[in-house]
Image (cartoon, rainbow, N blue to C red):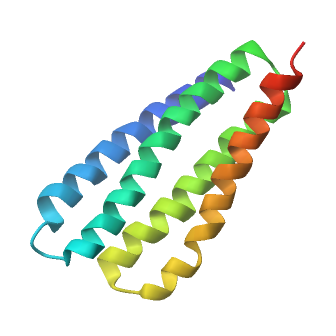
């Protein structure tokens, strides 16, 4: 799983940069500044958790167990739900998508908790 999460981390970082560039160059002047901030928040958390996936890859190599793997899947789910809902909300104008954003935030929190617990309990 270490190679899988390193590869997914690199892919998610690539996507975060691409989506961020789209937001900075393609959305500026097309959406309200408040919505651009929302989009940028999605990109920022997307990148943080892409880097988190690289940490998960390292953790999988160091501590082979299910906990780092669970953290990786939680980070991916968080990127999809948290960042994805923010991207879609800005691009479509569907404000109700903001109601599901906290579910992605919870996935991020759980991923970090699981990863931290595994590091703390490692022998």
The answer to whether residue 111 is above or below residue 60 is below
Q: Residue at x 59, y 75 (%)?
A: 100
Residue 30 occupies which quadrant of the picture?
Answer: bottom left
Q: Give the image location of residue 57, x and y in percent.
A: 62, 24
Q: Position of residue 45 (x, y in %)?
A: 46, 50
Position of the C terminus by quadrant: top right
Question: In the picture provided, is 112 more to the left or to the right than 99?
Answer: right
- Give above or below for 11 relative to 119: below
Q: Is residue 10 visible?
A: yes
The answer to whether 50 is drawn above or below residue 29 in the figure is above
Q: Is residue 7 left or right of residue 71?
A: left
Please name whichever residue, 5 or 62, is drawn nearer the observer in this view of the structure. 62
Residue at position x 57%, y 34% in the image: 53
In this picture, residue 45 sits left or right of residue 92? right
Residue 4 visible within the image: no
Q: Nearer the viewer, residue 8 or 81?
A: 81
Q: Quadrant of residue 56?
A: top right
User: Residue at 50% across / 87% down in the picture?
Assistant: 96
Q: Position of residue 70 (x, y in %)?
A: 76, 41
Asked where in the image residue 102 lies, by quadrant, the reply is bottom right
Quick one: quadrant of the N terminus?
Answer: top right
Which residue is found at the position 27% from the left and 74% from the top? 34
Q: Position of residue 38 (x, y in %)?
A: 35, 68
Q: Seen in the image, is 101 located left or right of residue 106?
A: left
């Amino acid at each position: 799983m270490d190679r899988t999460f390193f590869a997914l981390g690199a892919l998610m970082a690539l996507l975060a940069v691409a989506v961020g560039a789209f937001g900075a160059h393609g959305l500026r002047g097309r959406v309200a500044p408040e919505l651009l901030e929302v989009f940028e928040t999605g990109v920022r958390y997307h990148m943080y958790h892409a880097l988190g996936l690289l940490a998960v890859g390292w953790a999988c190599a160091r501590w082979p167990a299910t906990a780092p793997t669970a953290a990786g899947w939680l980070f991916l789910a968080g990127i999809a739900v948290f960042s994805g809902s923010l991207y879609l909300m800005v691009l479509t104008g569907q404000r109700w998508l903001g109601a599901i954003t906290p579910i992605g935030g919870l996935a991020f929190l759980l991923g970090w908790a699981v990863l931290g617990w595994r590091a703390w309990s490692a022998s």
